[in-house]
C-alpha cells in the first residue's frame, strides 16, 4: 500500500500503462525522481524502441533521454509488470467515436490487464489519468474489480488524477502542470499527492473523491468551450453591426479581469468538444438544467457551418457560385503545431463546402493522408499546386503562417482569402493582391 | 480643440458633469494632474458642500481632499461652466428601469445642458463615461447636435470612454484602472488617450470608433454574466449527483487558465444584468444569433427563484411548509460593502419566498428603508429581533460575516441556515447548532 513514508523514501515500484505522449514523460519523471519504474505498452514497436534505449515518438525532447539502468524496466507483458507494482498509472488514449462519445475500450482493456495481474497483498493503487467524465472510473473498473474478486480498500485502491499536459507547449509538460487527485481512501489520496509532487513543480491538489477529480477535469473543458463559444457568437454578431469583433475583444482585454479568447472556425480535440456532452448527459439524467452548457456546445459545433456560409457569401459577392469554386483549406489538425485530427472543425467545414458543390483541397504537412478521415477532400502536397479560387486558413501552423502569400496569389484567379483563425495581418494580404475576409470581420 | 500638445502643456479646461462616485474622483484627478477643472452637478447639496470645501459623499477618501485654489471651480449652472470648456466629461448615473432598460434621461439632460452652452469656436470634445450600449452615444446626442445646429467634427467632437471604476475597491479606482477611448476623430481620440493617461496609471487604449468603445464595455459585462451563469448552472447540476460545486471549482482553479467564479443567488448592479439585454436587442435587430448570451442571462435571472425553491425544499424536509416560515435575509445590496440596490437578486428572491407564503425580513445596515423598492419585506434593525426560522445569507457584507451565529441561533426555533454566497464555514455554523444548506451543496 502506498504511504507518505514510502513516497518519501522512494520505496515504491510504479507501473505506467500506455507509453504515449503522456505516459512516457510520466515514466521518465518518476524514474528521475528515484522510483523503480516499469513501463508497459501494447505496441511492440514502442517497446522495442524503448528496450534499445531509443525514443519511440516524434518529440525530440526524448532523444537520448531513455534510461538504461536497473530502475527502468520496459515490457509488453502485463504479468511481468503489474504483480510488482505498488502504484499503477494508466495513461492510455481516449479517442473520440463518431457520435462524440469517448472510446473507453483502452481504459477497459488496460483495467483487465491490471486487475487480473494484481498482487493483492501489495494493495496497489490504480490511478487513471485519461480524460473521462464524472463516474467513469468506477463505472468501467468497478465491474472488473468484481470479476477478479478484488475489494476496493482492501486488495486494491482506485484513484483519478486527470492529465493536464498541453501537446506542443513545453511550459505545460507533465513536470510543470498542477494536478488534482482524488481516491477512494484519504490516506491513499494524501500519499498520491506527495507522489505527484515528486513529478511536477506545480501544485498537487487532493480532493475528497474520485468523482470530484473527474468533475474538475470536465469543468475545465466546459468552461473553455463556453468562453470560446461566447467569442464565436460575438464574431457572428458584431460584423452585422459593422464592428470588428477582434477590435472589441482587444479593447475589453485591457480590463484586468477580462478573459481573452479568439473566435475561429470551431474547436477540436478529445476534450473541449467531447466533455460537455457527458456532463449534459449526466446532468439531464439527474434532472438538472443544462441550457447554458448545451447552448455553448451548439454555438461551437455550428461554427464550421456558419463559416462555410460566410465563405460562400463572400465568393457570391464576387459573382461566383459554390459549384464553381476550388477551395483550399490550409491546415487540418484541430490546433497548431500538432498532428491531432480528433474532432477537428476543418472536417465539418470541408463537408459543408462540399455539400454546397465546391471542390475542397487540403494542405497540412503535419497530417498523413490516411488520417483525413472520411471527408471527400483532395489532399495536396503544396498549396501552390491547387490554383484555388478561395484560400481558407484553418489551422495556424507555423508553416501556414510562413506561406509566401504573393506567390500563392499568383496561382489564384479569384484571389479570395478567408482567415478562419484571425492570425494574419490583412494589410499584408491585401498588399499581396488578395480580397480578404475572416471570422468576425464586418 | 483638444490636441496632444495642449494635454502636454496642461492648456485645457475640463468640465465634469455629474459629481458622484465616478465624477468627483475624476475631477480631483484631473485637477491634481494640473488642469483647470470645472465641476457641474444638478444637486444643490453636492454643489454647496463642494463650495465649502467639504466632501459631499460618504467615501472617507475625499474628507479634506477638496481643493480651494483657482483651478478648481464648482457650479450648479451649465452656462457658467460649459462655454469655457475644451473637454466636457459626462459621468451622470444610469439607473435601471423596471423592464431592465437603463434610464438614459440623465445622459440626455446632461447633453442638453452641454450642447446649448457650447462655445463652437472652441470645438470642445464631449466624452460620455456612463454605461450605455453600442450606438447610444450618437442615438441620444445626435438629435441634440442637430437641434442646436452643431456639426460633429467642426463645432464639437463626441467620444466615449467607459468608466471601469469598481465601487468599494481601492485598487480599481479612477486613478488605477485601464481605459478604452473611442471618438469621431482619430486626432481627438489620440489626444484624449493622452489626457486620460494623466488621470490613471493604467493603460489607455484608443479604438477606431465610439461604437467599438461602447461594445467593449458591453462585452466585458456579457462575459462576466456568462461565466457567473456557468458556475450557477453547475451549482444546480453537481448537488444532484452528490458533489459540492465549490470543491470542483476550487480543484479546477488549480489549472493555470481556469477562471474562478463563485455561484450565488444571482447577479445585480446596473451593468451585468442590464448590458446583455441590449446586446441581445441590437443583435436580434441585425439578424444575428444570441442563443448563448440569452441563455446565460436566463440562468442568472432565474437563480433567485431556483434558490427560493431550494430554501423551501430544505425547510420542507424539516417538516415546515412555506406559509409557516419566517425567513430572514442577511443583506440586500447586490454586492458587499456598498449600498447599491439596483437589480439586486435579493428582491426576486424575497418575492418568490413571499409568493410561496413565507414572511420575509431583511437586515442590511447599508440600506435605508426607503431604498427597499417595492418588495413587501419587513425591515429589521437587528438580525436577532426576528426569531427567524430560516436565515439566508444574501450579501457578504463584513457586518454579516461577523454575526455571532451562536447568539442568532438561540433566537431561531427551526435553525435552518442557507448560505447564498458560499462565504461561511459550515462547520462553524453546525457547531453553533445550525442545520446548514447553501448554493451548490449536495
Image (cartoon, coloured by chain):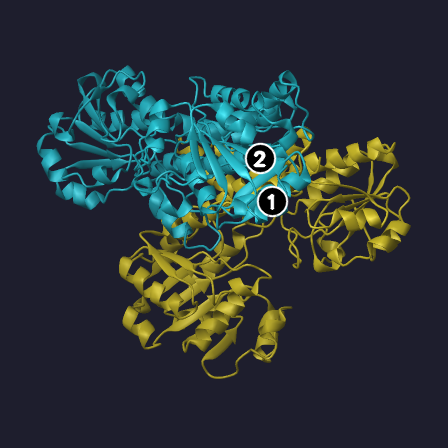
Chain colours: A yellow, B cyan
Which residue: 60% across, 70% down?
A: A46
Task: Give the residue at mark 1.
Answer: B6
Image quarter where the C terminus of chain B lies is: top left
Considering depth in this image, is B151 or A32 the residue closer to the camera?
A: B151
Secondary element at tag 2: loop
Secondary element at tag 1: helix
Q: Quadrant of residue A232?
A: top right
Left or right of residue A382: residue B237: left
Task: Give the residue at mark 2.
Answer: B86
**Mark nearer the N terminus (1 vs 2):** 1
Considering depth in this image, is A374 or A291 the residue closer to the camera?
A: A291
Specify the subunit that label 1 lies on.
B
Image quarter where the N terminus of chain B lies is: top right
Residue A396 image point, x, y percent: 69, 53
Determine whether label 1 and label 2 are within 8 Å by CB.
yes
Q: Is residue B439 above or below residue A41?
A: above
Q: Is residue A308 visible?
A: yes
The local crowd at label 1, few if under 14, some if 14 to 19, many if 20 or more residues have their Cα within 10 Å, is: some
Residue B301 image point, x, y percent: 42, 26
The local crowd at label 2, few if under 14, some if 14 to 19, many if 20 or more residues have their Cα within 10 Å, is: many
Which residue: 57% across, 48% down?
A: B9
Residue A30 image point, x, y percent: 44, 72
Going by the picture, which residue comes out furthest to the front? B70
Residue A187 image point, x, y percent: 27, 61
Q: Is residue B377 above or below residue A408?
A: above
Q: Quadrant of residue A320?
A: top right
Specify the subunit that label 2 lies on.
B
Considering depth in this image, is A206 or A320 the residue closer to the camera?
A: A320
Q: Is residue B207 visible?
A: no
Considering depth in this image, is A149 or B280 the residue closer to the camera?
A: B280
Amino acid at each position: 500500500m502506498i504511504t507518505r513514508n514510502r513516497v518519501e523514501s522512494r520505496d515504491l515500484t510504479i507501473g505506467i500503462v500506455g507509453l504515449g505522449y503522456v505516459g512516457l514523460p510520466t515514466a521518465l519523471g518518476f524514474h528521475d525522481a528515484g522510483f523503480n519504474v516499469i513501463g508497459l505498452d501494447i505496441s511492440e514497436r514502442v517497446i522495442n524502441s524503448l528496450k534499445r534505449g531509443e525514443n519511440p515518438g516524434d518529440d525530440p525532447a526524448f532523444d537520448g533521454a531513455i534510461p538504461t539502468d536497473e530502475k527502468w524496466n520496459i515490457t509488453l507483458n502485463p504479468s511481468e509488470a503489474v504483480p510488482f507494482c505498488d502504484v499503477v498509472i494508466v495513461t492510455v488514449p481516449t479517442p473520440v467515436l463518431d457520435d462524440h462519445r469517448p472510446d473507453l475500450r483502452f481504459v477497459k482493456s488496460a483495467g483487465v490487464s491490471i486487475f487480473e495481474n494484481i498482487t493483492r497483498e501489495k494493495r496497489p493503487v490504480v490511478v487513471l489519468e485519461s480524460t473521462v467524465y464524472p463516474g467513469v472510473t468506477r463505472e468501467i473498473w468497478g465491474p472488473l474489480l468484481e470479476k477478479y474478486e478484488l475489494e476496493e480498500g482492501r486488495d486494491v485502491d482506485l484513484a483519478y488524477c486527470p492529465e493536464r499536459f498541453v501537446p506542443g507547449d513545453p511550459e505545460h509538460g507533465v513536470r510543470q502542470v498542477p494536478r488534482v487527485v482524488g481516491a477512494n481512501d484519504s490516506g491513499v489520496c494524501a500519499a498520491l499527492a506527495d507522489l505527484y509532487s515528486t513529478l511536477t513543480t506545480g501544485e498537487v491538489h487532493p480532493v475528497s473523491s474520485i468523482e470530484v477529480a473527474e468533475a474538475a477535469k470536465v469543468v475545465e473543458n466546459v468552461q473553455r468551450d463556453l468562453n470560446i463559444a461566447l467569442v464565436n457568437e460575438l464574431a457572428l454578431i458584431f460584423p452585422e453591426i459593422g464592428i470588428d469583433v477582434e477590435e472589441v475583444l482587444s479593447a475589453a482585454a485591457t480590463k484586468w479581469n477580462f478573459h481573452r479568447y479568439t473566435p475561429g472556425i470551431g474547436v477540436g480535440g478529445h476534450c473541449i468538444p467531447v466533455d460537455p456532452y457527458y456532463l449534459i448527459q449526466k446532468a439531464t439524467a439527474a434532472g438538472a438544467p443544462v441550457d447554458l452548457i448545451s447552448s455553448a456546445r451548439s454555438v461551437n459545433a455550428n461554427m464550421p457551418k456558419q463559416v462555410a456560409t460566410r465563405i460562400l457569401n463572400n465568393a457570391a459577392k464576387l459573382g461566383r457560385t459554390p459549384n464553381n469554386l476550388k477551395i483550399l483549406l490550409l491546415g487540418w489538425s484541430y490546433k497548431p503545431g500538432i498532428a491531432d485530427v480528433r474532432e477537428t472543425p476543418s472536417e465539418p467545414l470541408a463537408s459543408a463546402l462540399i455539400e454546397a458543390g465546391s471542390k475542397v483541397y487540403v494542405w497540412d504537412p503535419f497530417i498523413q493522408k490516411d488520417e483525413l478521415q472520411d471527408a471527400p477532400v483532395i489532399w495536396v502536397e503544396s498549396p501552390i499546386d491547387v490554383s484555388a479560387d478561395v484560400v481558407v486558413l484553418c489551422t495556424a501552423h507555423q508553416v501556414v503562417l510562413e506561406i509566401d502569400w504573393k506567390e500563392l496569389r499568383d496561382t489564384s484567379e479569384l484571389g479570395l482569402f478567408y482567415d478562419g483563425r484571425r492570425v494574419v495581418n490583412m494589410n499584408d494580404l491585401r498588399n499581396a493582391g488578395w480580397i480578404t475576409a475572416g471570422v468576425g470581420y464586418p
